Every structure is written in structure tokens, then in C-alpha cells.
Amino acid sequence: MLRIEKTIVQKSVILQLIGEVDASNSVELDDAIQTLVQEDAKSILVDGTGLEYISSAGLGVFMSYLEEFEEKQIVLVIFGLSDKVQQVFHILGLDQLINIKETKEEALEVVYAK
Amino acid sequence: MQNKLRLYCDTQQLAELRLFLNDFLITTPLPEIEQHQVTLAVEEVCANLIIHSHDCNSTEFIELSARQSEEGLIFEIKDYGVAFNLLEYKEPELSRVIKEKRKGGLGIILVKKIMDKIEFESSETENTCRLFKNLKSK
């Protein structure tokens, strides 16, 4: 089960992922990000505090947007990942490609620094 | 100790697969963070088979068994579809995954990084993939 909640803090959109992302629902994550891109979001913060699990299907969604984010200068920051979930990003080396922070405050700082 | 699960080829079943794996792994001495990784690796193989070898046909199924031996944990996955030998699969470079905006290919990288040994056998009627995780971790 995955629930995605969207909130706006100043000019940043926070996507909160609650539950598990796998091959059955990664399309929901894809749609949520696609919508933000279409709405011209300039910074996307992903709140992973409620994310219990993510498989390659979900990780692949993030990967598939990295180039477009760079072209459109969209800042992506993921924060609040549990150790076990963060470890999965690390195994693939995605923590080198995606900005990952511990807290929302740190994530917002990245956006403000832009 | 042996645990078996018949998994119908529908990605909605993956949550059930994780419950099965968690129930098994919790009985093993594997550290929690590695239990999570092993769950992920086994799910990646099963998801591949469900999606690519069985086209998400929910009347078809794959079979998983999990057991602990002296050396470690052994997961055996049998399927009856088009053989997919992940040992022969050349996983993409991450840079290519990004460039081509492909959403696949990462799963096999995870499996190979997480598991200690992978075996694959194929006969006329079935394919067997065996994943091993050592208990004395690398």
C-alpha cells in the first residue's frame, strides 16, 4: 500500500510517501512527479519518513527524471529515509546522484541555497 | 525448516510475498538491515518473472521456497514461463539508465549486489533460480 500526500511549503512541494513502493504501484509515484513537472514545480522534496520499503520499480522512477530535472533546473531532495531504506539507495549508488538529507529543515536549506 | 509460497503472477501479490519473506527471515539470525535487503532481492527476481516471463497473467504462478542451511539462507524460485537467466543478463550502467530514462534494469543490479551466490537452471518445463545469502556476512 502506498499513499502519496502533497503539501506546499513556501515555494516547495513536499511529496510524502507513506507505505511501500513496489512494481504494483510505482506508477502512482511516477504520476505524482509527472504532475509536479507539468505544474512547473521548481523544487520537489520527497518526505521519506513514512516510506517503509522501495523496490527498484520506485527507485527507477526517480532515476528516470534525473535528466529532465537537470534540464529544467528542478531541485529534488529526498529526506527522512530510514536506515534500511537509505541503504538501498546506497547499494545502487543513488545517494551519489540524488540529494538525500536527514531532516526536512536540511532539505529546505538545499532549496533556499539555490 | 522449509517455507513455501505459491505466488500468482500479479504484482499485487508482491506485498504478500514480502510478508512471507519477513515471517521467514525473522526466524533467522540475519541482521535486520540485511533482512530488508534480502527481501528486496528476492522480490526483484519474483517481480521480474511475474512481469516479464509471465506477462502478469494472474492465472499463472511461480513458486518460492526459503530455507536455512548451515552456511546460510537459500531461496529457490521456480517458474514455468520463458526462461530468464539473470546470470547471463548484462545489467546496464547507471549512466545509461539515466540517459535512456529507463525504469528497469536496476533490480538485477540489486540482486547481484545483495546476494552472495546465484544459480540458474532451466529444463523444458521449468526454470529454477536459486539465491544464496551467507550467514557470516562478507
Image (spheres, helix red, strand yellow):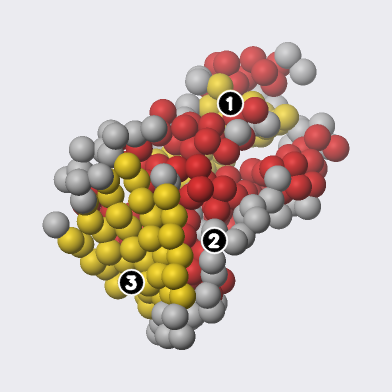
Q: Is residue B67 left or right of residue A105?
A: left
| Mark 1 vs mark 2: in front | 2
Earlier-in-chain disc, 2 versus 3: 3
Q: CA distance from mark 1 to mark 3?
A: 37 Å
Q: What's the residue type where badge 2 is placed? A: Leu
- Decide: few, some or many residues near mark 1? Use Cα within 10 Å; few <14, some 14-19, many ≥20: many
Q: What's the residue type where badge 1 is placed? A: Ile
User: Circle 3 is placed at which residue position?
Assistant: B63
User: Circle 1 is placed at which residue position?
Assistant: A100
**Residue A2 can be seen, yes or no:** no
* Residue at (47, 32) in percent of width and height: A87
Chain that bears disc 2 = B
Q: Are marks 1 and 2 in contact (CB under 8 Å)?
A: no
Question: Looking at the rendering, in which quadrant would you find the C terminus of chain B?
Answer: top left
Asked which secondary structure carries label 2, the reply is loop
At which x and y percent is residue B21? 29, 54
Question: Same chain for marks 2 and 3?
Answer: yes
Q: Is residue A95 left or right of residue B99?
A: left
**Residue B21 can be seen, yes or no:** yes
Chain that bears disc 3 = B
Chain that bears disc 1 = A
* Residue at (85, 37) in percent of width and height: A71
At which x and y percent is residue A43? 71, 31
At which x and y percent is residue A82? 41, 30
Identify the mark at residue B86; answer none if there is no mark.
2
